[in-house]
Image: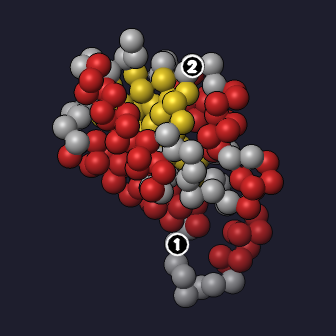
Amino acid sequence: MYKSILVPFDGSGGAEVALIAAINLAKTIGTASVTILTVYRHHSMLEASVSMVRPDEPGNLAAIMRAHATDVAERGKKIALDGGLNDTRAFVVAGPTSRTIIKFAKEHDNDLIVIGSRGLGSVEGYLLGSVSHKVTGLAECPVLVV
């Protein structure tokens, strides 16, 4: 059975449903751990230049995005802990969402990815296909789309 379940978590309702499904599955298995992964995209040079002309909004854009992603990951970890799953870790990584999820799963020997069918998304998601669709097509381990 599964030993290490990865749950990409962006804080959306779909991600929360996937996380709860992963928690229940891990508890049913009894020996599976759950890893929560929050991926944030690096800002573009255009976004960086826009942030420079807004002196009233302090802070480095990348640091602000990372801080928000960390809050999201910690919220996911709290959901898992409140659900009775103590063997839970949360990570925050910058990069292209689908590829980062797949790379992370491979590097951490996750043997199952549980992902929401719809997340926060972006215009890119509508043009290129959803993150869950890409992950199911590219992952080397089984993927459960909830």
Element assignment for label 2: loop
- Can you identify the residue that label 2 sits on? 141
Q: What's the residue type where badge 1 is placed?
A: Gly
Q: CA distance from mark 2 to mark 1?
A: 39 Å
Indicate left or right for 2 with 139 as reference: left
> Counting other residues with Cα less than 10 Å from the Cα at mark 2, is it few (<14), some (14-19), or many (20 or more)?
some
Q: Which mark is residue 59?
A: 1
> Counting other residues with Cα less than 10 Å from the Cα at mark 1, is it few (<14), some (14-19), or many (20 or more)?
few
Q: What's the residue type where badge 2 is placed?
A: Cys
Residue contact between numbered discs 2 and 1, judged by CB atoms under 8 Å: no
Q: Does 64 sit above or below residue 130?
A: below
Along the viewing direction, whichever of 17 and 82 lies nearer the viewer: 17
Quarter of the image for residue 60 reads: bottom right
Image x and y of residue 126, in percent: 75, 55
Image x and y of residue 113, in percent: 50, 29
Indicate left or right for 36 with 77 as reference: right
Q: Residue at x 54, y 82 (%)?
A: 57
